[in-house]
Image (cartoon, grey):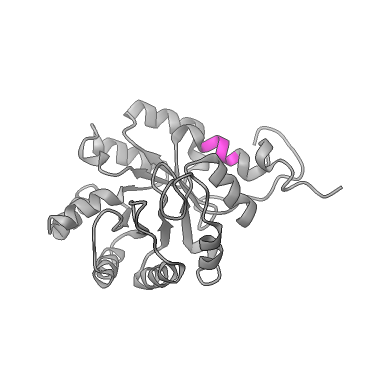
C-alpha cells in the first residue's frame, strides 16, 4: 500500500487459499498481459484463458509462462475441456495439459451432458497431477438446478479432489447462481453455504453489483471469479471499503 489508512480490513496474502481473485483473459496480447501484471499482480491469484481462446491465442506457451512466472495459477477455460470430452478425447486433453505444463485445470459440464460420476472420475484423474477447479451449473438460462443438487454435486466434486468448486454465472453474470437480470439468487447461495464451506467455493461474479453482494455477505476475503482485467483494482477497492458501495462496511460504528 502506498500510505497508511486505518480501518482497512485484513486481506489474505499470496499464495491465498481464500480471498481469491480469478481473472478472465479472453485473448489479451502478450503486451496487454504484461501491462495487467505490472499494475495488478498482487491482487490476482488465478488467470483463466476463457472458454476456447487457448485454441486461437498467439504465443500461447509464452503467455502461460508469463503468468506462471508471476506466481499465478493459469488454466484453459472449461469450455475447451468440454470440447475435448464431447469428441471423446480426454486422453488428448491430458496430453495438452502436460504439453503446456499447466499448474491448474478446470473440469466443467456447463455446455454438455456429462454423467456426474464420470465427471468426478475425470477430477480424480487430473487431481493426481495438477490443481483442479470444477464448475457447477449450466450455461443455459433454461436449466435450473435445485439447491440440494448444487450441494450434492459440490460435495462429491470436492471429495473427488477439486481444490475449489466454481459456481457458474458465465462471463455475463446472468445464469446459474444469477438470474438473467444479473441479480444474485440469494436463497440459493445461502442454502449452499449451510453445507459447503465458503472457502471451498469460487463464485463467478463479473458484475460490480454481484461483487458487492458477495463482499457484504461473506466479507473481503470471499473468492470471486470471471473478473475483467480492468476490474481487478476496482474489485480490490470494494474488498477494502475504498469504493462507495462498501465504504461503511468496515468502518467502526459511530
- Which quadrant holds the N terminus? top right
The number of numbered discs placed on residues in the rendered structure image is 0
Q: Is residue 110 above or below residue 71?
A: below
Residue at 23% x, 54% y is 82
Question: Toward which corner of the image does residue 61 lie, by quadrant?
Answer: top left
| Residue 95 in sight in this render | no
x then y, percent, for residue 116: 28, 69
Across and down, in percent, residue 221 comes to 59, 53
The quadrant where residue 23 appears: top left
Q: Considering only vertical position in the picture, is 31 above or below 105?
A: above
Nearer to me, 191 or 89: 191
Q: Residue at x 49, y 52 (%)?
A: 15
Q: Nearer the viewer, residue 214 or 159?
A: 214
Residue 49 picture quarter: top left
Residue depicted at x 55% and y 57%: 186
Image coords of residue 51 (percent x, y): 29, 44
221 horizontally vs 33: left or right:
right
Residue located farthest toward the top when viewing the structure as drawn: 31
> Is 130 colored magenta in this rendering?
no
Main SS, magenta region, reads: helix
Residue range in magenta is 232-236
> Residue farthest to the right?
254
Image location (x, y in percent) of residue 34 = 40, 30
Q: Nearer the viewer, residue 244 or 18?
A: 244
Instruction: Evaluate whether residue 243 shows in this view.
Output: yes
Taking depth in this image into account, of 40 and 155 the one nearest to the observer is 155
Amino acid at each position: 500500500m502506498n500510505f497508511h489508512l486505518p480501518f482497512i480490513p485484513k486481506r489474505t496474502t499470496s499464495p491465498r487459499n481464500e480471498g481469491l481473485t480469478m481473472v478472465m483473459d479472453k485473448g489479451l496480447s502478450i503486451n496487454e498481459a504484461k501491462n495487467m501484471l505490472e499494475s495488478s499482480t498482487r491482487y490476482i491469484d488465478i488467470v483463466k484463458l476463457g472458454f476456447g481462446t487457448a485454441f486461437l491465442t498467439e504465443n500461447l506457451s509464452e503467455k502461460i509462462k508469463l503468468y506462471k512466472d508471476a506466481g499465478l495459477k493459469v488454466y484453459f477455460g472449461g469450455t475447451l475441456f468440454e470440447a475435448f470430452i464431447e469428441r471423446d478425447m480426454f486422453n488428448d486433453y491430458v496430453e495438452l495439459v502436460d504439453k503446456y505444463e499447466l499448474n491448474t485445470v478446470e473440469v466443467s459440464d456447463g455446455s454438455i451432458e456429462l454423467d456426474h460420476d464420470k465427471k468426478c472420475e475425470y477430477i480424480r484423474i487430473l487431481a493426481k497431477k495438477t490443481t483442479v477447479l470444477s464448475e457447477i451449473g449450466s450455461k443455459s438460462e433454461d436449466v435450473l438446478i435445485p439447491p440440494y443438487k448444487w450441494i450434492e454435486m459440490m460435495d462429491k466434486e470436492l471429495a473427488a479432489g477439486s481444490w475449489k468448486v466454481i459456481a457458474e454465472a458465465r462471463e455475463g453474470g446472468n445464469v446459474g447462481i444469477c438470474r438473467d437480470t444479473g441479480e444474485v439468487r440469494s436463497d440459493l447461495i445461502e442454502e449452499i453455504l449451510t453445507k459447503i464451506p465458503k472457502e471451498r467455493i469460487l463464485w463467478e461474479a463479473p458484475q460490480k453489483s454481484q461483487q458487492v453482494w458477495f463482499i457484504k455477505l461473506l466479507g473481503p476475503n470471499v473468492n470471486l471469479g470471471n473478473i475483467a482485467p480492468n476490474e481487478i483494482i476496482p474489485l480490490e477497492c470494494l474488498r477494502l471499503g475504498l469504493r462507495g458501495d462498501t465504504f461503511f462496511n468496515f468502518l467502526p460504528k459511530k
